Image (spheres, rainbow, N blue to C red):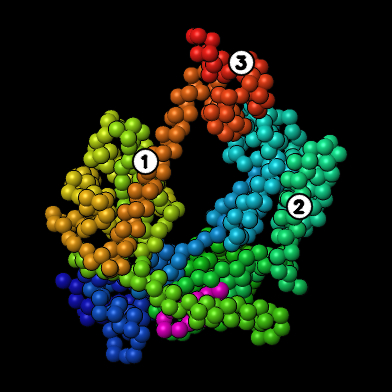
Amino acid sequence: MFDIKEELKKLPDSPGVYIMHDKADNIIYVGKAINLKRRVSSYFQTRPRSPKIEKMISLIDHFEYIMVESEMEAFVLECNLIKENRPKYNTMLMDDKTYPFVKITLFEKYPKIHLTRHHEKDGAKYYGPYTNVTALKEILKMFRKLYGYRTCNKKLDGQCVERPCLYHQVGECMGPCSGNVAPEEYKKGIDEIVRFFEGDSSSVKKSLKAKMLECSENMEFEKAAGFRDMLQNVEELSQTQRVTAGFEMNRDVIGIALKDYKAVVQVFFVRSGKMVGREHYLLEAESDDKKEVLTEFVKQFYGGTALIPKEILLSEDLEEKELVAGWLSENAGRKVILTTPQKGKKEKLVELAVSNAENLLAKDAEKLLREAERTTGAIEELGELLGIEAPVRIESYDISNTAGFESVGSMVVYENGKQKKSDYRRFKIKTVEGPDDYASMREVLTRRFTHASDRNDSFTKLPDLILMDGGRGQVNAALEVTESLGLDIQICGMVKDDHHRTRGLYFENEELPIDTSSECFKLITRIQDETHRFAIEYHKSLRSKAQVRSVLDDIEGIGATRRRSLIKHFETITAIKEASTEELAKAPGMNIKAAQAVFDFFHKNDKGE
């Protein structure tokens, strides 16, 4: 029995981190303290607090603490524990949005370019973050056609020569893997791309104009029109980037609006003097103090995958400003400046961020409330219905097959009532023959949970609740797996009626009806539909690929590369079947002999064979 009064007496007068648990041993709050004894004891004294903290204190069953040597160690440990456990009563981002960076591996002999949501200290050049992902992908697609940069992960040292891939054959890669491209020649295009992302688009425009004119002179008017469209896209992008005069340094500008323990934080991303994007973030606050809430936001935002700029402009001074600045500088590997400007252009930019945040909070207050009801409110309803703590992480599973053909399993993930698509997983059934959904589900869950300890990503996270697309049979199959692996995870079945609509939940050998007008019911329906869609989508893609293989792979001389080339060139099997030998030979990677083989294969019945 944990005696809180007695345990408070044992607390040390030293810095550290304290962790609050409820009766079910869930971590509900993590905090740091310069003096653990004073800080933790303050929670159990009579004093005015926010309703959220009062509720949290009423749920505390026991606590633990970790002593450290310094305040900085406590700060870092607190950040890590909050990020890992996402305690319900800490100030948390309500939406876990991350945006991509452009990564250019300049340290490689033949640099590659790709999108990533993780900024690492690996010697590569990173640009961003970019909030308009669609536009960014179009720009990179244009660069691939213009400069032929590689996207593969091959380690190219110039010694090992390989056959170029399909991108080279269609003119979208210079093919450095072939050994026929000098590093200096390859890097000319990379240098132009770097200049573009650093704000100088003149080289790109010049190259596009030259390509456009060259195609026009050669009477390749369709290609010329393509380069003209690319040029227009670059012109538009250059004009829409807002220039902030005199701001050559990379900066983030952060403003906050706070009301009734709901906060909106607006962030402007300024890179090389230009605003490359902006985004707002929603927080469920534990305090009505803007400084406290903004401090928690900065810790969470920059403790993730965000690129830390040289300067961060803030609408409020942070609590423990020097400590936060030291932590950011250590993570960035260089000095990071935190400032709250009081005059000039910087102050105007911060005021703009604040006014945007206030407008969003005022305009979307009802929307935020409805969103909370759809997500966290629905999760709390679900917990009450099942008689368990509101589940933060839910994983839902389904099996899809056609008479046992290409059986697949799907796993979708919801955290705090919202989709977490980055954690979705697909499983191709390997050990089960025929349409045995229960055995297939046992395989999927066994693979999912046995591999959890072998990995170092989101797959290691275990769910608070597993939802099965089905009733007693599927639930029992899941229980067999979790019990055999010694896992204590709640498992619930989503039961449908004769019209394939959700009618209730099967939990602990009992079917529980759900109020069809409740947010809980709507959430369960969304999860069930999403799980089914994800499984069906994967099954269709495998079935389609199998059908393509079954036709083209039977043709002598047509391997995987030529098959992909034919499909890309003609788009459908029907078009391939109707093409002449000469037309088939025009596809990249094809020759007359291979074209004749394809033509003969599809027209053998015409010859009476």
The crowd level at tag 2 (other Cα within 10 Å; few <14, some 14-19, many 20+) is many
The crowd level at tag 3 (other Cα within 10 Å; few <14, some 14-19, many 20+) is some
Q: As drawn, is 462 to the left or to the right of 476?
A: right
Whole-percent x and y of residue 291? 50, 82
Q: Which mark sits nearer the N-terminus, 2 or 3? A: 2
The crowd level at tag 1 (other Cα within 10 Å; few <14, some 14-19, many 20+) is many
Q: The disc labelled 1 sits on which kind of residue?
A: Phe
Q: As drawn, is 360 to the left or to the right of 525?
A: right
- How many angstroms separate mark 2 from mark 3 (CA)? 41 Å
Where 198 falls versus 437 (above or below)? Answer: below
Which residue is labeled 3 in the image?
596
Whole-percent x and y of residue 207? 80, 47
Q: The disc labelled 3 sits on which kind of residue?
A: Gln
Residue 231 disc label: 2
Specify the quadrant of the image occupied by residue 589: top right
Q: Helix, strand or loop at disc 3? A: helix
**In front: label 2 or label 1:** 2
